[in-house]
Amino acid sequence: MNNLAGSSALMRLIIRRDWLKFLIWAILVGVIPVSMAASYIKLYPTPESLRAFSDLVMGSPAEIGMLGFVYASNVGALTAWRAGLNGAFLIVPVSILFVIRHTRSEEQAGRSELLGSTASGRLAPLAASLLVLLPLNLIIAVIISIGLISLGLPATGAWVMGLSAASVGWVFSALATLVAQLTESPALARTITLIIFAFTWFMRTIGDLSGAPGSEGWLSWVSPLGWLRLTRAFAGEQVWVLLLPLLLTILLSGVAALLLYRRDLGAGYLPVHAGPAQAASSLNSPLALSWRLHRNALIIWSIGIAFFGFLLGTVGVNMSGFVDAPQFRAWANGMGLSNAGDAFLFLIIYILGQVISAYGITIVLKLYSEEKEGRADSILAAPVSRFNWAGSHLFWALFNSTILMLILGLSIGLGYGLNSGNLTYDFLRLFSRTLTPLPAIWVIIGITSLFYGWLPRFSAAASWGLLIFFLMLELGWELQQISPALFKISPFAHVHWTIQVSAQSLLVLTAITLLLITGGILGLRQRDMG
């Protein structure tokens, strides 16, 4: 039988299951860069104002570290700068989740085995997933390009920018299919791929900060996220750079197909150790069982956060040397900070807090997957209340997110303090800074628990959608398109890295978290399970 037999039928099935999610995602990601360009046209109508804003951005090491260089003082180049890596944070995670959902998750659930008993080839699920996701990323590119052209921007730059956005989705979709062959667990596959995504962003950051426009560091050239910016849309386009993600996508997809063809259905290449025949006495409570479910993910996240944090702390010390210029020092002083390195670290701590809030969402949504797949019924059939069962997962959502922020503080503080020569002082101030985003993270967890308690079927879409909404509010506030009062709807507005966070704000956010979790548990107790 042809190994690709049945791919077209599986493609239709994937589209039928997720067409609405695909549509919303494509329109959202495609429209955001167009709205940014329209905002820049309105905010900076003259070449002088565009040049002044570009100079301001290039004088901020945090902006360069986060989004890269502004390669030209025009609306298109500013849009490519602002929307490029921001767009990657909307394109890449969703691409990863969709690919793993339709490959490894289907395999774990046993549906791939059922399909294999029909006239379906061995490689059909992998091929169908990629043949849906890769063209979908291309559709996003078309939406971006046509939207920018409609605003009067040059067509060449518009198409290069759109294809650059699509290319990063291609690379990480292919990477997700490869990682899905290595492990039996969809959750572990997602975690590994997202950690690699974060690491490539870090590589691009160091590469840009250690170089200059036109002479970026070599780390920018080995990172797929670096390629996204190195195409230089609207600033003397380097179209040939698009060949790099295309070739890498083909390579990763080919290796993934080879690994899939050679392994057994349901198996992975990473070793899995069989557990004991009987559960240990330590697993005789819902809290212990939920810990067992979330333990591996916490270990992987902890290792990644510790490694990432230590590198950031080390780079933070050297940052002052990288950006020892009058405009950088003035920017840091305007933030009330002693140097630009501190400002860069505070920004990264804030962003990683938002990333860890996404991790908290996944823990809470485990409640719905346990309920949907029938495992919750087995637990609740024993003398275990819904409060104890749900509370055990919510406890680990709050506890694990706190642990990750503490690990981030420890690693950044140690990395910075060991290199600065003033370990005690630098460690304490950076460690304390990592605690400020925690109440906002807890609020996100509380919102997810509220959605699960009352609207379990829509809890995933509502929780992820609201998190994206908060991030979009922040983006609109940064672009001066929404008022600070509207931005304050987001819990992150009250712990933003540019403000002095008050104890009152932290206490209010904590109280809101308790109310949200209480509301979620009340909803769970009143509704039917399943």
Image (cartoon, rainbow, N blue to C red):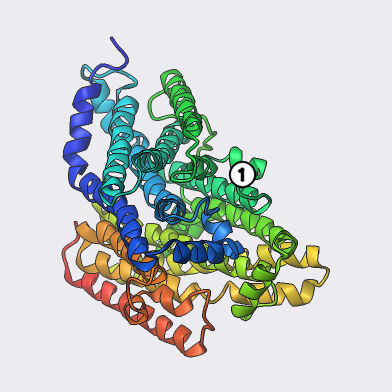
Query: Can residue 403 be seen here?
Result: no
Residue 170 vs 24, above or below: the answer is: above
Q: Quadrant of residue 257?
A: top left
Category of crowding for the residue at label 1, using alpha-carbon neighbours closer than 10 angstroms: few (below 14), some (14–19), many (at least 20): few
Q: Is residue 323 left or right of residue 129?
A: right
Q: Residue at x 46, y 33 (%)?
A: 239
> Which residue of the protein is positioned furthest toward the bottom in this rendering?
504
Identity, as a three-letter code, of the amino acid under mark 1: Gly
Image quadrant holding the N terminus, namely top left
**Where the C terminus falls, by quadrant?**
bottom left
- In this rendering, would 300 be left or right of 100? right
- Nearer to the camera, 324 or 517: 324
Q: For mark 1, what is the residue?
A: 214
Residue 346 screen position, x and y as percent: 59, 70
x and y percent of residue 468 in the render? 34, 61
Q: Quadrant of residue 98?
A: top left
Q: Is residue 512 above or below residue 260?
A: below
Nearer to the camera, 418 or 207: 207
Does residue 131 appear in the picture of this structure?
yes
The residue at 16%/63% (across/down) is 528
Residue 218: x percent and y percent? 66, 40
Left or right: residue 47 versus residue 408 is left
Q: How many marks?
A: 1
Q: Element under label 1?
A: loop
Q: Residue furthest top?
A: 1
Of residues 136 and 259, the one drawn nearer to the viewer in this rendering: 136
Residue 395 percent across, percent down from the top left: 43, 69
Q: Residue at position x 25%, y 67% from top?
A: 451
